[in-house]
Amino acid sequence: MEDALYGDDPEPAEPLTAGRLCVPVRPGTRGLVTRLFRTPVGGRTAVAFTDPARLRAVLGADQPWIPLSEPALRALTEPLGVRALRIDPVLTAPRPAAGSVPLPEPLSRPLTALAS
């Protein structure tokens, strides 16, 4: 009777995506590597799309990609400390051009500790 009451949860907290995902990649020293992105608050995340048209709409027609399942993508990124996965993101910010973001000026004097 307890088994019937406390069985598997019919609604998992994090639904799994069935089938193939289109995962953006970039050239690496030994072939293609998965591209990792940043969340709005700066955390690292993997990104995947449910079809090539969605990937092209967000990242451009020249973005290379490979087909992977969700478990395979998670297995590739987890050793890197990346546990977040965004599927079909629609908003992205363009990368700033080199030199377009000014660097902060160095301090003119060293920081000192305040006496309490």
Image (spheres, rainbow, N blue to C red):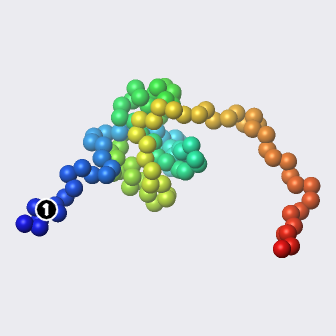
Horizontal and vertical percent position of residue 105? 85, 48
List the single residue furthest toward the right. Answer: 108
Front one among 38 and 97 = 38
Horizontal and vertical percent position of residue 39? 54, 45
| Image label count | 1
- Badge 1 local density, few (<14 within 10 Å), some, or many (20+)? few
54 relative to 41 in the view: left or right: left
Considering only vertical position in the picture, is 83 above or below 112? above
Q: Residue at x 36, y 31 (%)?
A: 51
Residue type highlighted by circle 1: Leu
103 relative to 75 in the view: left or right: right
Residue 31 shows up from this direction:
no
Provide the residue designation for mark 1: 5
List the single residue furthest toward the left. Answer: 1
Instruction: Name the element at disc 1.
Output: helix
Quadrant including the C terminus = bottom right
List the single residue furthest toward the front. Answer: 116
Horizontal and vertical percent position of residue 29? 55, 49
Q: Residue at x 30, y 47 (%)?
A: 15
Residue 92 shows up from this direction:
yes
105 relative to 96 in the view: left or right: right
Q: Residue at x 51, y 32 (%)?
A: 91
Q: Residue at x 54, y 34 (%)?
A: 92
Horizontal and vertical percent position of residue 49? 40, 36
Quadrant including the N terminus = bottom left
Front one among 32 and 77 = 77
Considering only vertical position in the picture, is 109 above or below 16? below
